[in-house]
Image: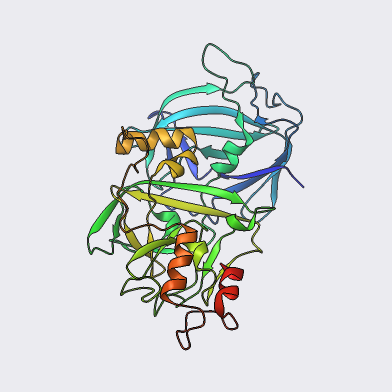
């Protein structure tokens, strides 16, 4: 088994134009067909480059293969980062772009942020990548986790988000899109981010949560929805989960596991999450389920790579209080998992006949604790 894996933009999907010094992602880019998979092993913590630019690579232990969208192997041998560039998006933001090769074969590009199909990115700096520091700043070797985190986005499910341009899969949401909020207004996306989570050996608390069709009321959601365990869901609202709380509150998805149609997913090996933030915290529709956009509090920021934190501070401004969310306050009161469980127990006891919320066979406090 390889130690690491990540996806790249295929070389023919992201093209460089020398006269304009720019890269452009194909307007018809499709993550299902325009990505390559890189799998490799290594005996240290860094993915090194090719300092001599000779198609050999500086670390002979970085060995693996690249596969196209059909699963066919397109290259095998020593994996390394050949060159890197700093490219600039239309808002003036910088994105790092690495060219990945295997024994001299170009197998794709990986970027520090998702690229937008059809958009051109101007190159503002570029260098060969070596494994020693150089005066030209060419020491760009980076931890393997960086590449796994920034694997070219692919959402594990086709979660549909309500936007002004219709129901759009989450992996296609980008800065500038307008999301329909529960408040009836349209809210502009300022930031989106995709991250891959390896679930092999992950504790139960990190497992994705499946909210089945209709689990929180008619059309809530309209089809099965997969969210992270900490992703907040609205309950106690006339439009969703009425009777589960005394007032509208946002609760972690994992706190709803004892409800009929809600469960953790134990069989998935990996998943890619897509996050997006608006100027303010909002409740939106995902597969018809009323759930939150990301709230950029201290805990959330602490889990993001440093370059994403800097990007967010540039977008939202530095918060002098340090603890308050960059895009707060929260749209509704937020309860932790324990508080959410107490609220559910108080408002809708498991033994209450005919309430319809609980899984069959779960009655009384013992059943609630066993599945909470």
In the rendered image, the vertical position of residue 187 relative to residue 49, given as above or below: below
The residue under the point 60% across, 26% down is 141
Locate residue 284, reporting x and y percent: 34, 62
Left or right, 59 with reference to 189: right
Residue at 65% over, 24% down: 50
Q: Is residue 226 visible?
A: no
- For the rendered model, the colour scheme is rainbow
Q: Quadrant of residue 88?
A: top left
Tally of numbered discs: 0
User: Residue 156, located in which quarter of the rendered image?
Assistant: bottom right
Classify residue 146 by image quadrant: top right
Q: Locate residue 193, reporting x and y percent.
A: 44, 46
Dividing the image into 4 quarters, which one contains the C terminus? bottom right
Image height of 181 relative to 140, above or below: below
Q: Nearer the viewer, residue 213 or 62?
A: 213
Residue at the image point whose x is 53% and y is 11% from the top: 135
């Amino acid at each position: 088994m390889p130690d690491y894996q990540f996806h790249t933009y295929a070389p023919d999907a992201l093209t460089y134009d020398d006269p304009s010094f720019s890269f452009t992602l194909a307007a018809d880019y499709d993550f299902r067909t325009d990505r390559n998979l890189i799998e490799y092993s290594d005996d240290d913590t860094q993915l090194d480059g090719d300092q001599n630019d000779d198609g050999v690579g500086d670390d002979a232990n970085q060995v693996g293969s690249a596969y196209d969208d059909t699963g066919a192997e397109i290259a095998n041998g020593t994996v390394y980062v050949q060159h890197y560039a700093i490219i600039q998006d239309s808002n003036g933001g910088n994105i790092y772009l690495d060219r990945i090769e295997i024994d001299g074969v170009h197998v794709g590009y990986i970027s520090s942020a998702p690229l937008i199909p059809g958009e051109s990115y101007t190159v503002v700096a570029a260098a060969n990548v070596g494994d020693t520091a150089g005066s030209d700043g060419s020491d760009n070797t980076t931890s393997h986790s960086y590449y796994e985190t920034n694997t070219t986005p692919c959402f594990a499910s086709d979660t549909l988000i309500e936007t002004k341009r219709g129901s759009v899969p989450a992996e296609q949401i980008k800065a500038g899109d307008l999301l329909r909020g529960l408040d009836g207004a349209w809210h502009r996306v300022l930031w989106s981010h995709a991250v891959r989570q390896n679930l092999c050996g992950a504790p139960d608390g990190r497992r994705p949560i499946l909210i089945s069709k209709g689990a929180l009321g008619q059309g809530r959601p309209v089809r099965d929805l997969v969210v992270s365990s900490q992703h907040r869901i609205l309950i106690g609202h006339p439009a969703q989960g009425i009777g589960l709380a005394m007032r509208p509150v946002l609760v972690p998805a994992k706190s709803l596991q004892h409800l009929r149609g809600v469960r953790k997913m134990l069989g998935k090996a990996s998943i890619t999450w897509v996050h997006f933030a608006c100027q303010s915290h909002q409740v939106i529709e995902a597969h018809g389920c009323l759930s939150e956009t990301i709230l950029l509090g201290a805990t959330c920021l602490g889990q993001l790579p440093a370059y994403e934190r800097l990007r967010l501070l540039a977008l939202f401004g530095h918060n002098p209080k340090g603890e308050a969310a960059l895009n707060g306050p929260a749209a509704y009161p937020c309860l932790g998992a324990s508080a959410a469980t107490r609220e559910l127990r108080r408002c809708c006891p498991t033994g209450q006949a005919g309430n319809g919320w609980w899984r069959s066979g779960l009655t009384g406090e013992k059943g609630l604790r066993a599945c909470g």
